[in-house]
Image (cartoon, rainbow, N blue to C red):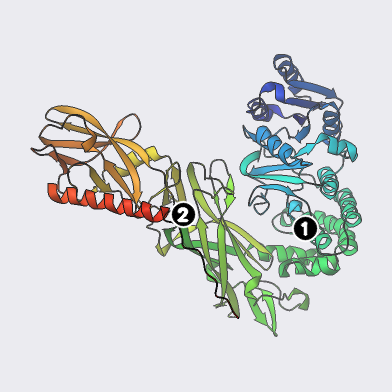
Amino acid sequence: MSVVVPVFDPGPDIDQCVRSVLGQSLAPDRYEAIFVDDGSTDGTASKLDRLAHAVPQVSVIHIPNSGWPGRPRNLGTDRARGEYVLYLDQDDHLAPEALERMAELGRRNRADIVIGRETSDFRTVPLRLFDRDRDRCTIEDAPLMDSMTPHKMFRRAFLVENGLRFPEGRFYLEDYLLVTQAYLRADAVSILASYPCYFYYRRRTGANAASGRLDEPEVYFDHLRQVVDLVVEGTAPGELRDRWLRRLYRYEVLAWVSEPFFLELEESSRDLLVTACRPLALAAFGGAVETGLRPVERLRSALLKAGSTDGLADLARTVQAIEGTASVKSAFWSRGRLEMELEGALGRPSGGPLVVQADGRSFLAGTMVDTSGWAIDGTADPTAYSAVVSIRQPDTLIEWRARATARTQLTSAVADGGAIGMRPILQVRAWIDPAAGASGGPLPEGDWEIRARLLGLGIDRRLNVGASTEGDVQAKPAWLGDPPRIAIPTIDATGGLRLSVRPPEYLAHLLDGRSMEWLPGGGRHLAAELPLASRGPVAPFDVRVLLSGPAGSREIPAQIVVVRGRPRLVVQVGLLRARLPRGVHDMRLCVGDRPGPAIGRAETIRDGRTFAVGAPRQTLMRAAASQAGRAVRGVVRRARRRRPRPPSTTASTP
């Protein structure tokens, strides 16, 4: 296993990258790290040399500055000895088990490419691609084109046999060129979605290795044309080619003439940009590629092809002013999942409409409706709007997509000036499963903010879900899973909806200051319903109860079990070898090493039986009858399970 890292003047930002490489769960003799120093001038070269001298699996290649990462990556690949090569940028880092998990997945499935889940604070993570783990897929049956970066694991023999190398020198989209060819030639691609592997975080200087690269727009779009040619040459006419070209058009052409980037340019720079990308738009992105765009994107495409710089700026300002809102109406537990009813809206500020009607046509509210070219279609189609719900950790920004459905109501609204318009309201139902919400795996412990992505007509808004003043989010904490954990819906200080996932030891904190609902008992055990919800299979969890009374203190074994969907604390006072002394004892729950919260008082009577103070007591005879009844019912259930089923009969016809 080989990791190749191109390096140029990273400063201290490379330290986390190095720590993540050396901190892998793989044994040091099972992988190597190759740092290719591309003529650094900030002292990094000597730092890497010292590292290579001290750590056997690290090596360094020094070359004169080439100006771009293509040559360093190629040289690192040539030096690599591992079965797989992973390309890592100097300002990114890996999760501790990334290499081990990705390599195991690749070997098990004989994959040519392995894609590990990505996390970023400045670039969009393709959540759809990482919905679930995939053993073997191709560009034909998976949305691989959503991830075009080179930060993947490639089988080295696959690269060599197909002559796949990065273009060297100053080449924009050098990663697209190699990844496109790799996708077209790969027999199998594996996707590790259930474990975050690769982290892109913004540098402290604000400029990452892959940012700020449109200072030569004519060169950029000439290089993009080469990527387009590869897609056209490598695919047959049809849906796959159109979808791939549409993706390139949307993110590598139209994004540059959209908000906020286009509005940040000087007018002269806008003109240069439109002049540079217009020929490619006219030549390569017509027909089904363009008609498959969303309405606002089609309008933007038409303005670009017409060379209307002012029109593109006006459209960018109009779209930038459109706001999104999302709030929770209710949240409750159902079958082990947090089920939420959310409401989202797209429109102008202060509840204004998204579109207005004039002369029998639809226009974005705020646009110049006196020009026919500004009209957009599809605005009254409810299927033109959708929502994606996800959960994200605020500190790590690890994000998982939740299951969700949405329906759209098109409501009337009044625009500035009195024009009648339409505002889409999305009614969203979403489910978050703490036991399987991480692409099939359990959600890691921590706080998770609920996010909504509202999409409509080519407008995209990502925002945190807030609490509604009319909503009901009083869902109880839930006791879930095997091993059990606690999941707690909360509203944070900013009014946002969150889900906190905590270990079972958090129960002591949760019960602190709460009264317990003790159930009737016969004196051989104490039982109390806990103020928690629970659904699905939940493993029993061992705890202890500390009883303190006139004769001292002693711990009694206890267990938390789920009975008819309710977590119950069961204290086995009948298991004591010696009877408790008569009198009243204070009870504390012990979860972990320390005594926890007070949970009530228990009284031991003359015959040694112990009852919770305030709970109804069963007589000795009634308790024995109840216990015998439970035993008989258990025998009957087991006998029924062992009884052979009668043979099925089929009616015959003459």
Give residue 476's position: percent from left, percent from top: 37, 54
Give residue 616's position: percent from left, percent from top: 15, 51
Please identify the residue farthest to the bottom as the structure is shown.
359
Please identify the residue farthest to the left as the structure is shown.
606
Give the image quarter of residue 456. bottom right
Give the crowd class for mark 2: few <14, some 14-19, many >=20 residues within 10 Å.
many
Query: Is residue 94 visible from the viewing direction of this image?
Result: no
In this view of the protein, which residue sits in the foreground, 553 or 619? Answer: 619
At x 73%, y 39%, the residue is: 106
In this view of the protein, which residue sits in the foreground, 241 or 309? Answer: 241
In this view of the protein, which residue sits in the foreground, 373 or 184? Answer: 184
- The amino acid at mark 2 is Leu
Give residue 335's position: percent from left, percent from top: 45, 57
Give residue 87's position: percent from left, percent from top: 76, 35
Give the image quarter of residue 209. top right
Q: Which mark is residue 497?
A: 2
**Left or right: where does residue 484 sit relative to residue 631?**
right
Q: Secondary structure at mark 1?
A: helix
Q: Which mark is residue 247?
A: 1
**Left or right: where does residue 285 sit relative to residue 419?**
right
Q: Which mark is residue 45?
A: none
Q: First in sequence: mark 2 or mark 1?
A: 1
